[in-house]
Amino acid sequence: MAAKKKINEREALRQALHQQGVQLTSQRVAVFEYLSGVEHHPTAEEIYLAVKPKLPRISLATIYKNLEALIKCEVVSKLTYGDAAARYDIRTDHHYHTRCLSCGKVWDLNAVEGSAWLKQVKPQAGFEVKDYRLEILGHCRDCRR
Amino acid sequence: MAAKKKINEREALRQALHQQGVQLTSQRVAVFEYLSGVEHHPTAEEIYLAVKPKLPRISLATIYKNLEALIKCEVVSKLTYGDAAARYDIRTDHHYHTRCLSCGKVWDLNAVEGSAWLKQVKPQAGFEVKDYRLEILGHCRDCRR
DNA sequence: ATTCTTGCAAAAGATTTGCAAACAA
DNA sequence: TTGTTTGCAAATCTTTTGCAAGAAT
């Protein structure tokens, strides 16, 4: 049952990648599966360390290359933060995030309703709006002890 | 009149810096004045290039050090973006920004009313909210030709 | 067989740091 | 005078790139 589901997921992944001429490799699958299984949005370094036990010869450069490949295939999205390393999210639909100011971890912010409010916020004249970014900053449960 | 105002501004700056044991130097003043006079929020590099004609021997490291000093004195705030260099803002009150996806420039987003809506957005359990970050992303007038 | 991918090391861009000389108070 | 700051160069951190060897289809 669980095994069958995994096989189906892998097939779906193969197809998404194939459309962009991207191959399915063990390194790629490992990155994808790790991202699918964590509740927060890890950095490239975290992914690297998590995947290394299974694939001891993998390099950090490969992690970065694979993340870019997965982004190209619209399977993963990249969240950027100036202070620190970028983070990677298995979701690609439009949504917002919560970020911990202590540990830097990032989570999805679910159930944001009424964001129609956002659309009525007006930028300067001549500015063409393409997207909104909303983040709640604070301290996560773990960091508060 | 304008000269008198500038002297008063400089005195106010001196006092703000003095409270933190920070001295008033020509380099510091140049960074502060450049930041006060631009409508967008420049990077350290932009400030460096803008200030260099007046102070040809200034170095980029000094710009960074001075920006940190001004931030410590709560006279400047830092806006961070993962893709690119950080940007510096002469405003230190809580407000939001517009950012151009083409050129990377950042402006203040004025008159954000109704942000009470933000306060009702609920993060995950156990998360202590400290701040909100809202950005409108798009293309600025100049980049649209 | 051909194209794509890996792993390594080196490069790149932004920012920080160590230190001796110069400056502000 | 005393502590702070400057300018330079070197170091740091994250991310990207070049390339020869290896893997996927």
Image: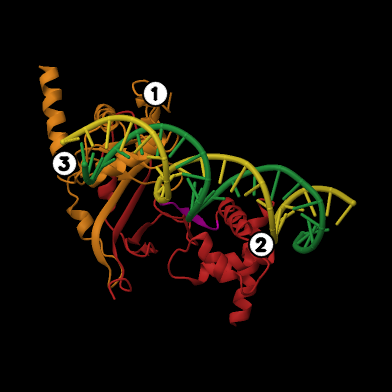
Chain colours: A orange, B red, C green, D yellow
State the residue at coordinates (39%, 64%): B105
Q: Of discs 2 and 1, which sits in the foreground?
A: 1
Q: Is residue B4 above or below residue B66?
A: below
Q: Of discs 2 and 3, which sits in the foreground?
A: 3
Q: Earlier in the sequence, mark 3 or mark 1?
A: 3
Q: Name the mark on residue A56.
A: 1
- Which range is magenta? B75-82
Q: Is residue B76 magenta?
A: yes
Secondary structure, mark 3, is: helix
Q: Is residue C3 above or below residue B40?
A: above
Q: Is residue B117 above or below residue B4?
A: above
Badge 3: chain ID? A
Does mark 1 fall on the same chain as mark 3? Answer: yes
Specify the quadrant that holds the C terminus of chain A: top left
Seen as rendered, the residue at the extreme bottom is B1
Q: Is residue A111 above or below residue B25?
A: above
The amino acid sitting under disc 2 is Arg
The amino acid sitting under disc 1 is Pro
Q: Which residue is mark 3?
A: A18
| Rendered location of residue B22, percent (x, y) | 68, 54
* Magenta span main SS: loop
Residue D3 or residue B43, whichever sits in front: B43
* Residue A7 sits in quarter: top left
Q: Is residue B53 magenta?
A: no
Q: Which residue is mark 2?
A: B14
* Residue A29 sits in quarter: top left
The amino acid sitting under disc 3 is His
Contact flag, marks 2 and 3 (Cβ < 8 Å): no
| Rendered location of residue B29, percent (x, y) | 63, 66
Does mark 3 fall on the same chain as mark 2? Answer: no
Badge 1: chain ID? A
